[in-house]
Image: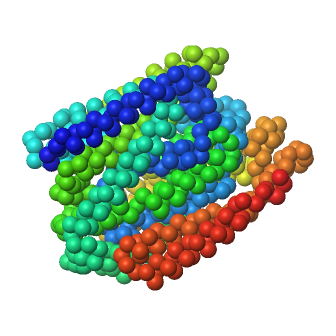
Amino acid sequence: MQLHAIDWAIIVGYFAVSLGIGLWFKNRAGESFVEYFASGRSLPWWIAGTSMVATTFAADTPLAVTGLIGKHGIAGNWFWWAWAFGGMLTVFVFAKLWRRAEVLTDVELIEQRYAGAPAAALRGFRAFYIAVVMNSIIIGWVTKAMATVLKQTVLHGSDAGPEIDFALVAVMLVITGGYSVLSGMWGVAITDVVQFVLAMVGCVALAVVAVAHVGGIDALQTKVTAAFASHGQGDPLAFVPDFDAKGTDLTFGVFAVLILTQWWATWYPGAEPGGGGYIVQRMASCRDERHAVKATLLFQLAHYCLRPWPWILVALVAFAMHPELLQSKDAGIGFPQVIRELAPTGLRGLMLVTFAAAFMSTISTQMNWGASYLVNDLYKRFVAPEADDRQLLRASRWASGLVLLLGGGVAWLMVTRGISVDDAWAFLAALGAGVGGVFLLRWFWWRINAWSELAAMFGSLAVFVGVKLWQDALPEADRMLGEYRSLLVASISLGVWLVATLLTAPEPREHLVTFYRRIRPDGPGWRPIAALAPDVRPDGDLGRSLLCAVLGTAVVWLTLPGIGAVIFGDFAKAAGCLGGAAVATFALLRLAVRPPVNA
């Protein structure tokens, strides 16, 4: 794909703006440790929320969506749409609790909630695991995806080997590292906003050009339906899966597992049960509880309702133009292939900026977020508890660089050695498959202790390994689908940590009372502790918050097909879906704006 002067101007201008933002916020980031990792707890909700959604828009995301559509049509996206209810729980139930905790990282909560050596060990282990192991794999994953984009666009047809692919991406890693190390969370958040706007403009423009190329929406529907039919696949435009489609593994049982269990059973970066990771970091950076709630709501709505349709349209065009991709194990390359084949001069540069922005917004977050664990939960907690702001800031910048180096090393292995990320993510899934329940209930049941989380984490790993060995010993035709395996692991792990909870001593009452006073959690699960602190008044609106989460999920799940129906000209369906979404939104706003019962 040849670039012209205007393409290069767009690309150079984008990188100049990114570096300029980093330099602009350099002094502010250097004011304090809290400024560096949490923007001094002064981010407005719209910046924090946009930063959340920009971070989850990585270079691999459009490719992953294209791959899901290649397997199951539009309905394949339920593999991630199913997390919507968990996200809405974070908005209406957990966001205010996280903000009250005033943590810098989610693992800092561990020693607020639990006491003693088990809590310290759990905090240290999770900090190391997230910052070093998981973070490096994520950086490697998105770097490999960016290398794939370059290979399918500007490097297509060249004899460049994987080392050249990595070298080009490494330049972006260095630039991202530069402004991230200098500017801390302020620079990361502001560049996220700019990067998200650019990325969405690029994707919308590409979708318009791509649909026009195949003859418009009606022609696209005809061509993509024929392409899927020629390969024996079901209706690619169905929003709800075609459970009777020949050869599909997106059965009713799998769909039910996704909808009913995925939101609580699995810990996944950006979709953690009860909130976690960089979502908590953004909430902790907000001005107050209201800003944290509004930021997280903006994230959920943009994540599920705003972003997907441009990706979906480009993916459908890719399969209409190249039906052979439907039989490919790497169908995701269809997205950058459309860029290479259809983007005109100017849009080529913008699309490369789109993917660079998506890539860099994720990398900058991973750097700042990963460094926050190393400094706040390892260095400050165990090595230098008396360190002042100057020492902590110096350590923060060094830690940010270390995170980038570690992630760059993993990325180099993945890109140049052709290492698959599947086995790495299987390991992450092992530690995450059964811990969701304990992450949710620790806020609402006083009896959960540090041993509960330890049993959930290591129990899920042991159960995962056992189930995998059992399944690998069976003939391939007799093996369970991955979703059923995850449910089995989560269910057994749930039993393991519940037994561990009941067999071990509860946390000291005085520690639980301190936590209860700080967080003011609702529900009957804190009744014994509430009796020891009769002066504490929880909000008293847990039931209403749960109903808000249900309504918020309805808004998402009705808006998604409603927008699709408008695009495809089915205006009766659009009226029904968007009308239902409007009713759910009205009810949600009426409930959400009421003051807490005990205000």
Instruction: Identify the residue at image location x=65%, y=69%.
Output: 586
Q: Residue at x 61, y 74 (%)?
A: 583
Which residue lies at the image location 72% right of the left edge and 52% below the top edge?
A: 444
Left or right of residue 444, residue 363 in this image: left
Residue under the point 52% across and 33% down: 186
Q: Quadrant of residue 3?
A: top left
- Image position, residue 272 (x, y; %): 54, 51
Camera-side residue: 496 or 547? 547
Point out the residue furthest to the bottom here.
Answer: 572
Q: Is residue 182 left or right of residue 95?
A: left
Residue 6, percent from left and from top: 22, 43
Residue 438 at x, y percent in the picture: 63, 51
- Indicate left or right for 338 with 281 as reference: left
Query: Considering only vertical position in the picture, is 244 above or below 285?
Result: below
* Residue 539 makes an appearance in the image: yes
Q: Where 8 sits versus 498, above or below?
A: above
Q: Is residue 393 above or below residue 573?
A: above
Residue 274 can be seen, yes or no:
no
